[in-house]
Image (tube, coloured by chain):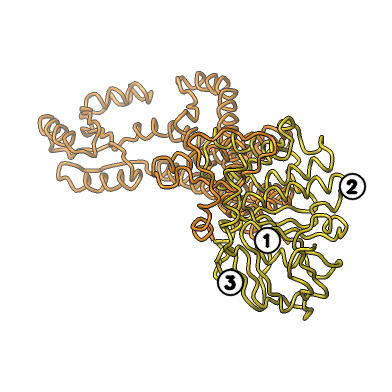
Chain colours: A orange, B yellow
Amino acid sequence: MIGASRTRRPQVTRRQPRPEPPPLGDVSVVERSTPSRNNPRASLRLYLQRHVQAMLYSLGRICRQPASSLMTIAVIGIALALPAGMYVALQNVQGISAGWESATQISLFLKKGVDENAAHALATELEKSAEVAKVSYVSPDKALDDFKRMSGFGDALDVLDENPLPAVLVVRPAVEKDGAAGVERLLDRLKQRPEVDIAQLDMEWVKRLFAIIQIGQRGVLVLAVLLALAVLLVVGNTIRLAINSRREEIEIKKLIGATDAFIRRPFLYFGLWFGLFGGLLAWLLVSSSLIALNDPVRKLAVLYDSSYKLAGPGVANGVVLMAISGLLGLLGAWLAVRRHLAEIEPT
Amino acid sequence: MASGIMPCVTTAMAEMVRFDNVGKRYESGVDALSGITFSLDAGEIAFLTGRSGAGKSTLLKLITLIDRATRGQIYIGGKNLTSVKRRQIPYFRRDIGIVFQQPKLLADRTVFDNVALPLIISGSFHHAEIGRRVRASLDKVGLLDKERAFPTQLSGGEQQRVGIARAVVNRPPLLVADEPTGNLDPALSAEIMNLFDQFSRVGTTVLIASHDLTLISRMGRRVLTLQGGALMTSSAALP
């Protein structure tokens, strides 16, 4: 059609180097110029211009209905603030437990025959291992002194004519990603050493802690998936309503030659904006909640003789949150648009 | 200005619209149109008339691909419409200006934005070019001073003229109008018809569905009369 009509139009085409708006009554409407169709850079610019137009148009639409827009954004923000807040809380728990992990110790009770030099040699050797953070040597004499001091059996122990305590190497494992399992493997290896009589570690609480953190992580994941689904539905429904209220406009646009992509575009940007703003709100909610909690937490930490401070979500996590949220908004809008836009055809 | 264009009209005798034994039967089994054969040359203006239900709107819907013919072939600008796939319809419609009985303007946008819409949709015009063409188009319908107004602030006749400005802003070779004066008083109707007449003088093919026989006869142009879905007269202009 376009090609065909053009080939026969030249006769009626007005050629004029710099066309001015014609005076009243002039009806030279048949002039058809084809600006910048064949210039790739110009088409790219026009393409971007179309996107910027749709983007700003949908932003303007959101701003023009502040109440209902804010409502949608608030729902998205709160829905995302829940998993995001739990994620940050979990990060903080892991921050605390990282301190505990470094306090995890394996006590190597050395055999009687191992003298001090051999014990030091073993300590140096063990310290070279990547799984070991630090090894300290406790001589039998020091152990006995400590025991006397702390147990209150000082006088009774004086009766012993020989120190019954063995030399001890206190091994601090370098806990890495595999956590409890890694510590357990190290323990097994240390048990095999000929110098070692007993290797001891109270693993139970470490295991429990890791298990709890794992449950927490899984819980956050499940919650995040569920609430992401909720965000999809919220955005999808909002877009569906927007499409319905603009039914006539869509029909008109289709009648004057709008492609599906053109009609779809502002709605997709609509969803994207909702997502981005919702993500921003979620980040603000989490950040301000942490600021509110920080003071009481610090007071509690002081009581435990710790300088522990809550870590906020941070800007990087905020950017990630907004990106995820923006994508969810876009996806929700896309689902709604795909379902409902095709139904609208001019009749 | 017009003198530069006038000679062209005489040479632009190519066919713009051709109906070849076209029929439209709805799923209910009713024949809305049957055996329609006629053609319009480029730059020709014709009126499509007949009683309500005679098939005027259906015929226009076939031209604009809102609906498809169930029999026969339709050629617009030499292109067979059966070969236009659904995805190509938007691009096809950009070469047809459509004027409706209701002006079908977007109420939340200014007159300027309404008229600019086809240019924005076609996506091949820069900002400055859009402004230039919109103003030229508004100028033609005599509403240059209303570009910042919203449609609801205009009278019915003015709204219809904005709709016409929107239909021609893209400079389509074919203009179809469905009862464009249906809601207007005789004076305004004549004014609108004169506008269409002017477009046809510069090479645009114009097809107007109307039942305003007085007005049509006064225009002295070709008339296609539909009756019960069949074409009664498709011949020469009234004397």
- Residue A240 position, x and y percent, is 68, 51
Q: Single out the mark in the foreground, 3 or 1.
A: 3
Q: Secondary structure at mark 1?
A: loop
Q: Amino acid at mark 3?
A: Thr
- Residue A18 position, x and y percent, is 50, 34
Q: CA distance from mark 2 to mark 3?
A: 39 Å
Q: A45 or A132: which is nearer to us?
A: A45
Please report, as a chain letter, where disc 2 is located: B
Residue position marked by numbered label 2 in the rendering = B185
Q: Amino acid at mark 2?
A: Asp
Evaluate if marks 2 and 1 touch, with contact meaning CB atoms under 8 Å apart.
no
Identify the residue at image location x=58%, y=40%.
A54
Q: A161 or A73: which is nearer to us?
A: A73
Q: Secondary structure at mark 3?
A: helix
Residue position marked by numbered label 1 in the rendering = A343
Please report, as a chain letter, where disc 3 is located: B
- Residue B177 position, x and y percent, is 74, 56
Structural crowding at the residue carrying mark 2, measured as other residues with C-alpha within 10 Å and reported as few (<14), some (14–19) or many (≥20) = few
Q: CA distance from mark 2 to mark 1?
A: 36 Å
Q: Tag on residue A20? A: none
Lower sequence index among marks 2 and 3: 3
Asked if residue B130 is positioned above or below residue B225 in the image, the reply reads above
Q: Are marks 2 and 1 on the same chain?
A: no
Evaluate if marks 3 and 1 touch, with contact meaning CB atoms under 8 Å apart.
no
Identify the residue at image location x=79%, y=79%.
B30
Q: B26 or A74: which is nearer to us?
A: B26
